Image (tube, coloured by chain):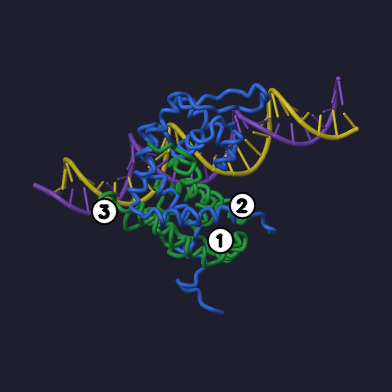
Chain colours: A blue, B green, C yellow, D purple
Amino acid sequence: MEPVTETTDLLALDRQVCFALSIASRSVIALYRPLLQPMGLTHPQYLAMLALWQHEPLSVKELGELLQLDPGTMSPLLKRLQALGYVNRERNSHDERSLVVTLTPAGRELRTRAEQIPPAVVARLGMDLDELQDLHTALTRLIKAAHTPDDQ
Amino acid sequence: MEPVTETTDLLALDRQVCFALSIASRSVIALYRPLLQPMGLTHPQYLAMLALWQHEPLSVKELGELLQLDPGTMSPLLKRLQALGYVNRERNSHDERSLVVTLTPAGRELRTRAEQIPPAVVARLGMDLDELQDLHTALTRLIKAAHTPDDQ
DNA sequence: GACTATTAGTTAGTACGCAAAGTAATTTAC
DNA sequence: GTAAATTACTTTGCGTACTAACTAATAGTC
């Protein structure tokens, strides 16, 4: 039996993709924090605003599908965005189960300020756009693989 | 001024690396959940066990540095691992401020079962090991870039 | 040797993220 | 047309993450 050394250890922390993913996600979100703070937004709230700027109006269900988040996560998050004055939440008159989320004028105006953020983050990272694009492609493939059912 | 179209929109959700990172991290962690559940572990707890299997004994501070987590996150997490019977927590007799975390026999035995997990996740993803290795390398570069101070 | 500063952990508060249970509206089946 | 199933959202509970305030122990300064 082969001895378990540093180089063959399947459980070595620094070889785990899941570990690198967790750290990378938290590290990048940390870069956004000081940029989002002046707007009163958290990173998940910022992602919800991105979705709304692009696709408003959206139901809670549609937003949850876009962001791949539970209704149990979306529901309080949207209440906080409403409390901040960035979104409206009202029932769909054609289907009272559904909640239509729209932007307030303040929420719509925020977009201009938000456009400063992506370039600021890229500059802060100091990485080539090509490399970031490659990473995005690789992550998209990983996400797809993770969502492909077991038996395919 | 150039019109903001789908293809030039800096704020398009599906172009954000931070968004892909969040989803990828959550999606991969979701793959671990059913595998970790029989051991009673969450994914962050699993990462802490990986660190301990590799480097035990570790202080809370050292564990937090390895996992890049706050003491405010580590402290309750380790109490839960202790409640599960996988780790001991006792003060360092040479420096009573420091808490030494060690594995219990049950915690040490768990390693054998845990060795099944990485191959199971890789199989579940159905991706080449090369591609995963490339992704790991890219993520490591991103983490390093995110941690490089602003003025360098 | 006492005063101050630093260090290691803990605790409280806020906001995700997910599971599970609950509610109300709509659809389906008969 | 009503009972049952489904759907959309809310709420509760638990475990991270992070900030900030706090406690206790140690180190540094004079």
Q: Is residue C12 left or right of residue D29?
A: right
Task: Where is residue A144? Give x, y as percent.
Answer: 58, 53
Q: Is residue B39 left or right of residue B19?
A: right
Alpha-carbon span between mark 2 and mark 1: 33 Å
Alpha-carbon span between mark 3 and mark 1: 46 Å
Q: Nearer the viewer, residue B64 or B23?
A: B23
Mark 1 lies on residue: B106
State the quadrant of the C terminus of chain A: bottom right
Q: Secondary structure at mark 3?
A: loop
Q: Amino acid at mark 2?
A: His
Q: Nearer the viewer, residue C30 or B85?
A: C30
Q: Is residue D1 above or below residue D13?
A: above
Q: Is residue B57 above or below residue A59?
A: below
- Residue A130, by quadrant, is bottom left
Residues behind callouts 2 and 1 on a single chain: no
Task: Where is residue A48? Give x, y as percent.
Answer: 50, 36
* Total number of numbered discs in the rendering: 3
Alpha-carbon span between mark 2 and mark 3: 38 Å
The image's mark for residue B152 is 3
Q: Is residue A91 above or below residue B112?
A: above
Q: Amino acid at mark 3?
A: Gln
Mark 2 lies on residue: A147
Q: Amino acid at mark 1?
A: Ala
Q: Residues within 10 Å of mark 3 (few under 14, many from 20)?
A: few
Q: Nearer the viewer, residue D19 or A69?
A: A69
Q: Residues within 10 Å of mark 1 (few under 14, many from 20)?
A: few
- Residue A94, by quadrant, is top right
Residues behind callouts 3 and 1 on a single chain: yes
State the quadrant of the N terminus of chain A: bottom right
